[in-house]
Amino acid sequence: MIEIQHLTKTFSTAAGQAHALDDVSLTIEDGDIMGVIGMSGAGKSTLVRCINLLEHPTSGKIVVDGQDVTGLTGAALRAYRRRVAMIFQNFGLLAQKTVLDNVCFPYKAASGRVTAENRKRALELLEMVGLAEKASSYPSQLSGGQQQRVAIARALACDPEYILCDEATSALDPASTNSVLKLLRDINRTTGVTIIVITHAMGVVEKICRNVAVLEHGRVVEQGSVADVFAAPQSQAAKVLLERVDWDA
């Protein structure tokens, strides 16, 4: 379980201090698919980067399975990050490496080498995402949806407990989006991995998430089950995202 407790992140700008996150508190249960949604600039990407400690919070805590990970450094931080995989909007694949080598990259990064067992596991993961036949191909030879599937296989390489998806489908066409979302849902059902979906698209949340938090100006303005929030949104931000605003009023 991830508990985000009173998280604040400020950045220094020419105009002074900017609050990217302002007293954010959330609980993400093990095995959940949790959506974090908001308009551009709401703080979604900053939140996800704080969860995996690519950004360090200005104040507050991130508690994972009862352990405060906020101040981790060195080997302890590296070990924690292996538990928290990330899938990016732009796929983040290495253009000069084959699909198989891309999936093996986490092993190389962790130990400096790739074993025969690592390669066997990588091929199993490519089979899971339906791309075993593309093992020797290069990213440029794949469609966007296929590249994101490779990124998902790479994310699974170290058997993470949590997968963070930062606008993972926003660069894809509708058919590829549906395919990737179905794959993530199936992986969640099969492995029990917890998935956190950062998006501005309510359609993505509706298809895959069980619970959702709505961010606006760095604050959580609404949270609950997807069914409840979609049925009766309380915040103006959720109403705008659901297109339930009377623009002529």
Image (cartoon, rainbow, N blue to C red):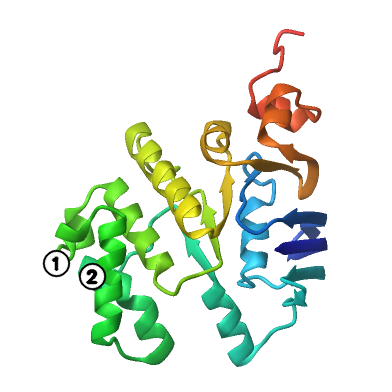
Q: Nearer the viewer, residue 172 or 121?
A: 121
Residue on which the image places disc 1 = 136
Q: Is residue 228 above or below residue 1?
A: above
What kind of element bears circle 2?
helix
CB under 8 Å between callouts 2 and 1? Answer: yes
Q: Is residue 67 above or below residue 146?
A: below
Q: What residue is at 38 percent from the left and 63 percent from the top?
A: 92
Quarter of the C terminus within the rendering: top right
Quarter of the N terminus within the rendering: bottom right
Horizontal placement of 123 versus 6: left or right? left
Q: Is residue 27 above or below residue 175?
A: below
Q: Residues within 10 Å of mark 2 (few under 14, many from 20)?
A: many
Q: Amino acid at mark 1?
A: Ser
Residue 34 screen position, x and y as percent: 63, 48
Q: What residue is at 67 percent from the left and 42 percent from the top?
A: 211
Q: What residue is at 66 percent from the left and 34 percent from the top?
A: 226
For the residues marked 2 and 1, what is the alpha-carbon distance in whole angstroms?
6 Å
Q: What residue is at 35 percent from the left and 62 percent from the top?
A: 153
Res 186 visible: yes
Q: Amino acid at mark 2?
A: Leu
Residue on which the image places disc 2 = 100
